[in-house]
Image (spheres, helix red, strand yellow):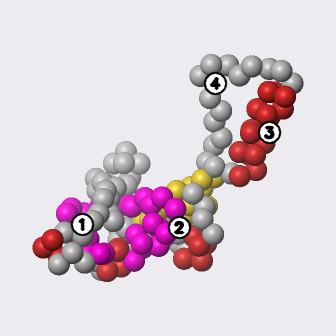
Amino acid sequence: MRDAGLGDRPIARDLLAPPAPEDGGRAGAWRPSEPFSAAVAIGDATGAGALAALGRTGLRVPGDVSLVVVGDPPGAAAIGVTTVAPPPRELGRAAMELLLDRIGGERPEEGRRITVPPLVVGRPSTAPPA
C-alpha cells in the first residue's frame, strides 16, 4: 500500500466483531484497536452495519476511512457505497457457455477455471487516505 501512495495503515479486520462483555454486551460497541484506512464488507446488510459502526466511532466515511462492499446489493447505491462484484451479464454468459458445452457432449476439463473480472462501481464511500 505504501508503494501505491496509500500509507501504512492496514485494512480493518473484525469490524463487526461480537460485543465484548466489558461493553455490557451491546451490539455495535466495536472500537478500532489501531488506525486503519479501509474496511471491506460482504453484502448489503453488512455494508450498512459497517457504515453505522464506523459512524458510531466518530470515523467519517470517506474522510477518515474508505468502505467497500463486495457484491452489488440493491441498497449500496442508496447509501453511496463503493462496490466490487462480478458483472452479472458476464457470469451469465460464462455459465451459458458451460451449459451449452455440456449439452453438446463436451466434458469439462478437470480443474478448469473461468475468470470473470470484477466490476468496480465507485461511489462516495472511498477516497485516498487523509
Decide which of tag 3 and tag 1 comes sooner along the chain: 1
Disc marking residue 77: none
Q: Quadrant of residue 91?
A: top right
Q: Nearer the viewer, mark 1 or mark 2?
A: 2
The kind of secondary structure element at disc 4 is: loop
Would you name the residue on which mark 1 appears? 32
Q: Amino acid at mark 3?
A: Met
Would you name the residue on which mark 3 appears? 96
Q: Nearer the viewer, mark 1 or mark 4?
A: 4
Decide which of tag 4 and tag 3 comes sooner along the chain: 3
Q: Residue furthest right?
A: 104
Q: What whole-number distance in Å separates the C-alpha atoms at marks 3 and 1?
A: 44 Å
**Point 74% across, 38% down: residue:** 94
Disc marking residue 112: 4
Q: Is residue 46 magenta?
A: yes
The kind of secondary structure element at disc 3 is: helix
The kind of secondary structure element at disc 2 is: helix
**Point 63% across, 69% down: residue:** 74
Left or right side of 68 for 28: left
Closer-to-camera residue (15/96): 96
Would you name the residue on which mark 2 appears? 44
Q: Position of residue 60 (x, y in %)?
A: 37, 77
Decide which of tag 1 and tag 2 comes sooner along the chain: 1
Q: How busy is the neighbourhood of tag 2: few (under 14 within 10 Å), some, or many (20 plus)?
A: many
Q: Amino acid at mark 2?
A: Asp
Q: Is residue 127 magenta?
A: no
Decide which of tag 2 and tag 4 comes sooner along the chain: 2
Q: What whole-number distance in Å separates the C-alpha atoms at marks 3 and 2?
A: 27 Å
The kind of secondary structure element at disc 1 is: loop
Q: Position of residue 82 (x, y in %)?
A: 54, 64
Q: Which residues are magenta?
A: 27-52
